Amino acid sequence: MKMITNETEPMELFETLAQLREETLASIEEAADLDALDAVEAGAVGRESAIASARRGLGQMDAERRRDAGRMINEIARDIEAAAAVRREQLAKEARAAVIAAEAIDVTVDYVSVPSGRIHPIQQVIDEVCDIFIGLGYHIAEGPEAELAWYNFDALNTPPDHPGRLESDTMYLDYGNPEDEMLLRAHTSPVQARYMEEHGPPVYIVAPGKAYRNDTVDATHLPVFHQIEGLAVDESITFSDLKGTLAEFARQFFGPTTRVRLRPHFFPFTEPSAELDVSCFNCDGGESSCRVCKGVGWLEMLGCGMVDPRVFDAVGYDSEAVTGFAFGMGVERLAMVRHGIDSIRHFVDYDVRFLEQFPG
Ligand code: DAH
């Protein structure tokens, strides 16, 4: 806009201001967002605007002209500011509506529900048992399922004529001498020998995993099943450490009032050897009609014993310097006893109605 001076004709000033007003109101209407609107408004009435420079020119006018010109300028500035305020409110409303539209959720729309997976009850028991032993200071160890006969039998003091070595019991992959004869491990006990070969004492490990036997499937047997092996070796481990450790495990797994008892047994790799029974968690040993223990009051749980010195010799430990205990438990049996499951076959039938009962 032209500079206003004392010579500026009122008509000329009026036309110039009227044109500015029309152009600015049109731009305000067209402003697409708040930033554009701010720019239009600043250009029309801000510090560096045409209106501002018109106001600065008023000083050079005589009093009468100044009054008329000043009123005209103020009116136009007010019109522009009012129009900008209306447009600002409108733009803000549109922006809010756009956010609401973009974030809207139609709660009536049908959704696709993806069934969530679960941890298999066998793995749940493995996790739970391992957690209990980790709490007692044990580490987890693992070994191969395709195993050398030496680790499965010989290192564990099992003689060449032991019936467990027959093909009717053990699945062989390759025949030969114990050092190169391959089989599918018949228990998790070979992990004991492998671990001790690699690590010096003290040893506190549990080793979960699969075991394989030439068994026909029935309510209590599968040719592939799971065991958890345990081994503690230190300078002065005694039989009472074995009993105390397994009693603590039984209390944590079956409940705080659980009692344990040991019955003499035989395993080639422990001497003395025992089987551990736990008091029935269902009837606490008190009911002849109990469906869990069938009135016996006790449940057979696992095999255990003091590590035979010959096992220490086989893995290069000094059998004069250390003692230890070992144990091995069947995971399927633990799960069946705990949940009252009548057939081991359920674990491998992959019937989701069965599996869904163990949410974990
Ligand atoms: N390996 C034995 C089995 O499969 C179970 C067992 C018994 C493991 C006594 C042990 C043990 O470590 O000390 O029947």
Image (cartoon, helix red, strand yellow):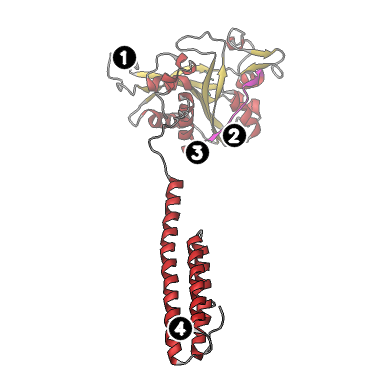
Region of the chain picked out in magenta, as a range: 136-149
Q: Of the numbered discs in the image, which one, if any, rests on residue 321?
A: 2
94 in magenta: no
Pointer 4 residue: 69
Q: Amino acid at mark 2?
A: Ala
Q: Are marks 1 and 2 in contact (CB under 8 Å)?
A: no
Pointer 3 residue: 137
At which x and y percent is residue 195?
61, 30
Q: Is residue 305 above or below residue 32?
A: above
Q: Are marks 4 and 1 in contact (CB under 8 Å)?
A: no
Residue at horizontal 48%, vertical 73%? 18
Comparing 98 with 231, the one in front is 98
Determine whether, in the image, residue 109 is placed left or right of residue 191: left
Distance between mark 2 and mark 3 Cα atoms: 22 Å
Q: Is residue 140 above or below residue 302?
A: below
Pointer 1 residue: 295
Comparing 9 with 259, the one in front is 9
The kind of secondary structure element at disc 4 is helix
Q: Are marks 1 and 3 in contact (CB under 8 Å)?
A: no
**Label 2 CA crowd tier, 10 Å (few <14, some 14–19, many 20+):** few
Q: Are marks 4 and 3 in contact (CB under 8 Å)?
A: no
Q: Quadrant of the C terminus?
A: top left
Q: Amino acid at mark 4?
A: Ala
Distance between mark 1 and mark 3 Cα atoms: 36 Å
Q: Earlier in the sequence, mark 4 or mark 2?
A: 4
**Label 1 CA crowd tier, 10 Å (few <14, some 14–19, many 20+):** some
Residue at horizontal 52%, vertical 21%? 226
